Amino acid sequence: MISLLRSSAVALHLVPHHPNLGTPARNFSAFAASIGHRSNAFRLPFVAESTVQVAVRTFKDMDVLTKRCKDCYFKKGDDRWYVLCKTHGRHKQRQRLPDERHFWII
């Protein structure tokens, strides 16, 4: 296991090659062979420069639920009603739960 780590570190130019450590592993990567300079070996051209934000359709908390199109339907779960839609994700609604502070006895 140590020899595998040592040979991969030598192949990636992380540590210099010493003759008493054995022969360095042969680099089989065509990408690494095309790069001649060591500083470019650590650069990955396939990694995106910036992060991409993915839009997620979450539920709207509503007091009164309404069906907004013909594909919307009601479903009950977790002690609240939901409106789900197969065609438009923006139609998703859920029943707003009452604030628990209204039930406190002071």
Image (cartoon, grey):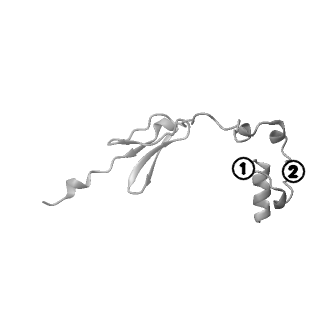
Q: Position of residue 65 (x, y in %)?
A: 37, 41
Seen from the viewer's position, the closer of residues 88 and 20 is 20
Disc 2 secondary structure class: loop
Determine whether 34 is above or below 3 in the image. Answer: above
Q: Position of residue 82 (x, y in %)?
A: 43, 47
Residue drawn at x 72%, y 49% is 14
Residue reaching furthest to the left: 106
| Crowd around label 1: few <14 · some 14–19 · many ≥20 (10 Å) | few
- Residue located 83% across and 44% down the image: 29
Q: Quadrant of residue 103?
A: bottom left
Label disc, if present, on residue 14 of the rendered structure: 1
Q: Amino acid at mark 2?
A: Arg
Q: Residue at x 71, y 35 (%)?
A: 45
Dots 1 and 2: beta carbons under 8 Å?
A: no
Q: CA distance from mark 1 to mark 2?
A: 15 Å
Badge 2 is on which residue?
Answer: 26
Q: Is residue 25 above or below residue 87?
A: below
Disc 1 vs disc 2: which is toward the camera? 1
Amino acid tagged 1: Leu
Q: Above or below — where is 29 with respect to 45?
A: below
Q: Is residue 11 left or right of residue 72?
A: right
Image quarter where the N terminus lies is: bottom right
Q: Position of residue 75 (x, y in %)?
A: 46, 50
Q: Quadrant of residue 32?
A: top right
Left or right side of 23 for 42 = left
Q: Percent from the top left, x then y, of residue 76?
A: 43, 53
